[in-house]
Image: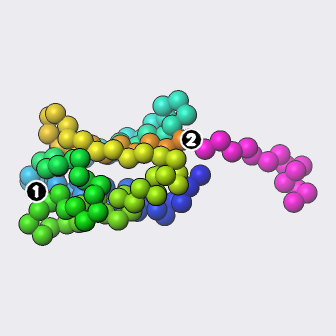
């Protein structure tokens, strides 16, 4: 349960930045995985680009990890901590030892009950 358009925009921005990173090194691989770990949904975006100069600052306002006036970092939606707080989630980023970057988004799995047909008919 969440704001689909906000979460979608965050994913689009991560993917766009991964594409930019891969273009910088002349190509490579990008992967997305989604799995459930216990009561959490885990989305992982990884690439084999040049990595991020300072992953600790990636979520700072106006931080541009691409340098040279290119790009806008991870974008507005992903930097807004309220987005993840509102969804009781977390976002993290790190450089991979073999090169490239990985972003991990974690959200609690929604626990919603489905109304029974008889109850739904009374509404």
Question: Could you tell me if residue 15 is visible in this image?
Answer: no
Q: Nearer the viewer, residue 24 or 94?
A: 94
* Spot occupied by residue 42 in the image (x, y as percentages of width and height): 43, 39
Please name the residue shown 61% across and 44% down the image: 110
- Left or right: where 115 falls relative to 7: right
Q: Which residues are magenta?
A: 110-123
Q: Nearer the viewer, residue 96 or 33?
A: 96
* Spot occupied by residue 31 in the image (x, y as percentages of width and height): 29, 44
Kindly state the secondary structure of the residue where label 2 is placed.
loop
- Packing grade of label 1 (10 A; few <14, some 14-19, many >=20) is few
Please name the residue shown 10% across and 56% down the image: 24
- Left or right: where 66 falls relative to 88: left
Please name the residue shown 45% across and 36% down the image: 35
- Left or right: where 31 falls relative to 106: left
The residue pinned by badge 2 equals 109
Is 47 situated above or below 21?
above
Question: Could you tell me if residue 26 is visible in this image?
Answer: yes
- Earlier along the polypeptide chain: callout 1 or callout 2? 1
Please name the residue shown 15% across and 60% down the image: 66
The residue pinned by badge 1 equals 24
């Amino acid at each position: 349960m969440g704001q689909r358009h906000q979460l979608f925009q965050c994913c689009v921005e991560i993917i766009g930045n991964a594409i930019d990173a891969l273009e910088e090194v002349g190509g490579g691989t990008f992967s997305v995985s989604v799995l459930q770990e216990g009561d959490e949904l885990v989305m992982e975006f990884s690439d084999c680009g040049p990595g991020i100069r300072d992953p600790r600052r990636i979520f700072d306002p106006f931080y541009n990890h691409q340098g040279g006036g290119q790009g806008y970092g991870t974008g507005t939606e992903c930097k807004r901590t309220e987005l993840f707080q509102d969804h009781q989630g977390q976002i993290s980023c790190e450089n991979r030892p073999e090169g490239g970057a990985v972003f991990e988004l974690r959200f609690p799995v929604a626990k919603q009950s489905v109304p029974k047909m008889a109850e739904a008919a009374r509404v």
